[in-house]
Image: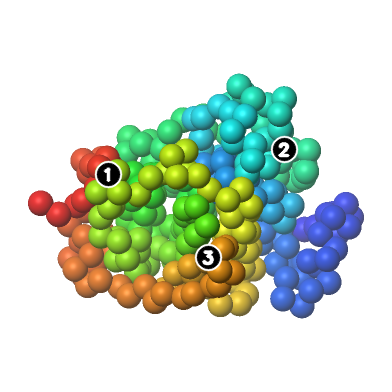
């Protein structure tokens, strides 16, 4: 456990004076490591608040470059970053905000060849990706490894967020396979309200901070569904599927290396 130096006692003073966090909770945050998959709409607020909170080690996985059409919602990147790798501008943003945080940029796509090794190096994964293949891959690797995942997804005016503890239920208990290709368009075809990923990403960051300070009620077992148009938040229970191929009683998936993460990402024959 880290001892807080005078500068850290100052920087994190509003945490340190809270009974629920205190110097111990802040030290736990400084000791924590989080891998953020995606430095886009969801990843931006997640990285902002996790960096500000003093998560000691932040890994960032992304292989995209900043495009001008990203700037409507991806608030850690600036106009002068257009054309640069997102992991570079994300790293600069975090370094400028909080020198306590060690940033580890991984300029790559998460694949079934690299995901197990990458994820093994972190305490928790934030799924801030924008596609089903990555979601199922993150779920399968983390569930097999027992690594907790903060999950978020956005679509036009609607967002979903939950936390998977790594001990089930998992994303596949909720959605055994991805919807047929073409039925759920992505942000670039369907559009998204620019502030929506900010809201959902902040929910994710909240869950991550609570996880490490071990306070409050986790979203584990509950899917929060937020409608920005109606300004409503609903809750859907996530029930463990005893036949789940990843977290069920007799899992059929032993490793992601042979699984398929395209199309419907199905694990059934
Ligand atoms: Zn499951």
Residue 178 visible in image? yes
Name the front one of labels 2 and 1: 1
Q: Is mark 3 within 8 Å of ligand 1?
A: no
Q: Which residue is mark 2?
A: 93
Compare residues 2 and 151 and report the one nearer the observer: 151
Give the number of the disc on residue 181.
1
Q: Which residue is mark 3?
A: 227
Q: Residues within 10 Å of mark 1 (few under 14, many from 20)?
A: few
Above or below, 138 relative to 227: above
Dot 2 or dot 1, earlier in sequence? 2
Above or below, 239 relative to 129: below
Dot 1 or dot 3, earlier in sequence? 1
At a point 81% along the width and 59% down the height, the residue shown is 12
What kind of element bears circle 1?
Answer: loop
Compare residues 217 and 252 and report the one nearer the observer: 217
Q: Tell me how far mark 2 sits from mark 1, CA to CA.
A: 35 Å
Name the front one of labels 3 and 2: 3
Dot 3 or dot 2, earlier in sequence? 2
Q: Is residue 236 left or right of residue 33?
A: left
- The location of residue 233, given as percent across then percent down, is 54, 72
Quadrant where the image shows the N terminus: bottom right
**Residue farthest to the front, as pictured:** 229
Q: Residues within 10 Å of mark 3 (few under 14, many from 20)?
A: some
């Amino acid at each position: 456990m880290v001892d807080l130096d005078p500068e850290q006692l100052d920087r994190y003073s509003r945490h340190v004076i809270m009974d629920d966090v205190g110097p111990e909770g802040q030290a736990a945050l400084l000791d924590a490591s989080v891998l953020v998959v995606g430095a886009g709409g969801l990843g931006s607020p997640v990285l902002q608040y996790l960096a500000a909170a003093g998560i000691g080690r932040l890994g960032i996985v992304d292989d995209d470059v900043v495009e001008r059409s990203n700037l409507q919602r991806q608030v850690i990147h600036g106009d002068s970053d257009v054309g640069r790798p997102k992991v570079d501008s994300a790293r600069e943003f975090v370094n400028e905000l909080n020198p306590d945080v060690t940033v580890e940029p991984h300029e790559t796509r998460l694949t079934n060849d690299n995901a197990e090794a990458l994820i093994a190096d972190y305490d928790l994964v934030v799924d801030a990706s924008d596609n089903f293949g990555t979601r199922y891959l993150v779920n399968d690797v983390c569930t097999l490894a027992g690594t907790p995942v903060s999950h978020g997804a956005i679509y036009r005016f609607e967002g979903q967020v939950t936390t998977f503890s790594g001990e089930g239920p998992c994303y596949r208990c909720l959605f055994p396979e991805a919807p047929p290709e073409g039925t759920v368009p992505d942000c670039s075809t369907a559009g998204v309200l620019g502030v929506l990923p900010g809201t959902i990403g902040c929910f994710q960051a909240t869950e991550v901070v609570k996880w490490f300070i071990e306070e409050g009620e986790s979203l584990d077992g509950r899917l929060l569904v937020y409608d920005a148009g109606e300004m409503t938040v609903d809750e859907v229970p996530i029930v463990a599927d005893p036949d789940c191929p990843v977290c069920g009683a007799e899992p059929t998936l032993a490793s992601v290396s042979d699984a398929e993460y395209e199309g419907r990402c199905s694990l059934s024959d």
